[in-house]
Image (cartoon, rainbow, N blue to C red):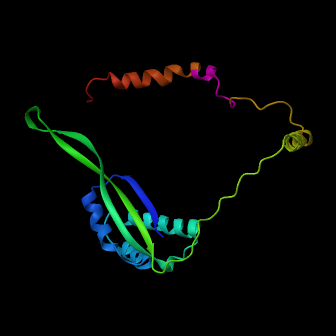
Amino acid sequence: MEIKADLNNLRMAPRKVRLAANLIKGMSVARAKAQLAFLIRKPAPLILKLLNSAIANAKHNWQIEEDNLFIKSIVVEAGATLKRWLPRAMGRASAIRKRTCSVRLILGEYQPSAAKPRKIGQPEILKEKEVVSESTEQAARIEAPKKETGLKGVAPDKPYGASSESKKRHWSRQTFGNIRKMFRRKSI
C-alpha cells in the first residue's frame, strides 16, 4: 500500500529542499520525524508538516498504524521560476530567478496489511413528504424564538453611524490631508 502526500508551489529552491529531503529517504516514520525536528535547515519544518499530513492520510483513510510506515520515496521537483529584475549601474538590469519546487512524499508499509479504504456513507435521499414536513418544522423553530424575545421585523442592514452622511461630513479631512502630503516640497 502506498500513501501519497504532495507539497506544491513551495517558494524555495529545489536544491536546498533536496538537502533536507535526502536525509530522511528510507527511514522509518518515527525516526524521520525526529531527524526533521532537530534539523537546522529552512525546509525541515515544511517537510515535517508534509510527513505528518501523509501519516494522517494513512491513519484516517486506510487505518494503518504509524509504526508500520516508512518513507518509500521523496522526490523534489522544480516548479515555476519567478523572474525579477535588479537595477544595476549605467541603466542595466540583472535577472533574479526566484525558484519554486514541489515535493512528493510516498509512504510504504513494512508488513502489508489487509487495509481497505474507508467507506464514505451514501447521502440519504428524502421523499417529497419528508422534505415538506422538515421544512415546516424548521420554520416553526425559527418563529418560536422571535415570539419569545419580542423581536419585530428584520435587523437594519447598516450599523449605526455607517451612513453616507457621516462620510460626506468628514470628506474634507480624509482627502486634503493626503493631498497636502503628496504635493509637499522637500521637507526642511
Please identify the quarter of the rendering in which residue 128 is found.
top right
Q: Position of residue 180 (x, y in %)?
A: 38, 22
Q: Nearer the viewer, residue 17 or 163?
A: 17
Q: Nearer the viewer, residue 48 or 184?
A: 48
Q: Is residue 6 magenta?
A: no
Magenta region, residue range = 159-167
Give the number of marks. Answer: 0
Question: Where the C terminus falls, by quadrant?
Answer: top left
Residue at image x 56%, y 68%?
A: 62
Q: Is residue 43 visible?
A: no
Q: Nearer the viewer, residue 103 or 130?
A: 130
Q: Position of residue 95 (x, y in %)?
A: 18, 42
Q: Position of residue 168 (x, y in %)?
A: 57, 18
Q: Is residue 133 visible?
A: yes
Residue at image x 24%, y 40%?
A: 84
Q: Is residue 96 left or right of residue 69?
A: left
Residue at image x 37%, y 72%?
A: 36
Please identify the quarter of the rendering in which residue 115 is found.
bottom right
Residue at image x 28%, y 64%?
A: 18
Q: Is residue 57 left or right of residue 22?
A: right
In the image, residue 160 sits, relative to residue 84, either above or below, namely: above
